[in-house]
Amino acid sequence: MKTVNLLLWSVGVALQAALLVGLFLRGMVRRFPLFSLLIAFYMARSVLLYFLAGHIGWAAYGDLYRVLSWADLALQLLVLAEIAAGILRGSGLWSRLRGLKAGLAAFATIAASVALAAELPSRGPLLVDRGSVFTALLMLLLLPWTLIAGTRGTVRRIVEGLAAYGLVAVVATLLRSHAAVHRDASAWAAAAYAQSGVYLAAVVYWLFTVRRPKAPGAADIPAEEQNGTE
């Protein structure tokens, strides 16, 4: 198990580092600074927790993990706001029907995420982190929103990766909570590995797809990218 964890950790750090380099070289850090910051945060958190494990007390380690988890949720919300702004910009003026549909879809996305997260138990034997589920649901529901808004290009590809991760994150959170109640270590580990695996798959997808289209003579941010199309 330790060998698998080390391999997964090493591959994850390498892939995230490659993605960050790719975002920088392709000029995408300027356009999506919060998304880039989230990837950097995940990589730094992984390295920090890995090297501190066993070198500080479990209480201190647990406190650090909780602080980083709150920072993770805050960054996720900021990234979702950044992506939402990109979707809305690509929907045209608010006077247009397309813009109105995108705005309504944004409201429906937030309302549905709040309603679904609120239905999850926060007390009793099956405890669920509503905050994590809420952000994961937002990631998942961004995808139908982009379909309604007709979003394409880089924003769409980022959303596709987030949606895949969000779906697995919701399922994995519920499975881990159920496994913890029944003290099923193998089921808990399987859910954790599945979530990590899908995240790394999303990183690989972004590594090969998140880029500015080549357009000789175009401005720093091409017009087709500004309106979310390619």
Image (cartoon, rainbow, N blue to C red):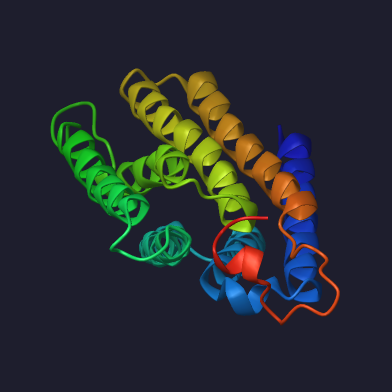
Q: Is residue 99 left or right of residue 193?
A: left
Report the residue at 59% width, 52% height from top: 158
Q: Is residue 102 left or right of residue 25?
A: left
Report the residue at 61% width, 55% height from top: 229
**Identity of the residue furthest to the right in this view:** 216
Q: Position of residue 54 (x, y in %)?
A: 60, 58
Figure check: 13 above or below 121: below
Q: Is residue 100 left or right of residue 154?
A: left
The quarter of the displayed image where residue 55 is located: bottom right
Residue situated in front as seen by the camera: 179 or 98: 98
Residue situated in front as seen by the camera: 74 or 94: 94
Please identify the quadrant where the N terminus is shown. Answer: top right
Q: Position of residue 103 (x, y in %)?
A: 28, 54
Figure check: 26 above or below 136: below
Q: Position of residue 34 (x, y in %)?
A: 52, 71
Residue situated in front as seen by the camera: 147 or 137: 147
Q: Position of residue 70 (x, y in %)?
A: 35, 63
Residue situated in front as seen by the camera: 2 or 48: 48
Report the residue at 54% width, 63% height from top: 227
Q: Is residue 55 left or right of residue 15?
A: left
Figure check: 54 above or below 221: above
Figure check: 192 above or below 83: above
Residue 67 in view: no
Report the residue at 44% width, 19% height from top: 184
Q: Please tell me how many numbered marks the rendered image carries.
A: 0
Please identify the quadrant where the C terminus is shown. Answer: bottom right
Residue 119 in view: yes
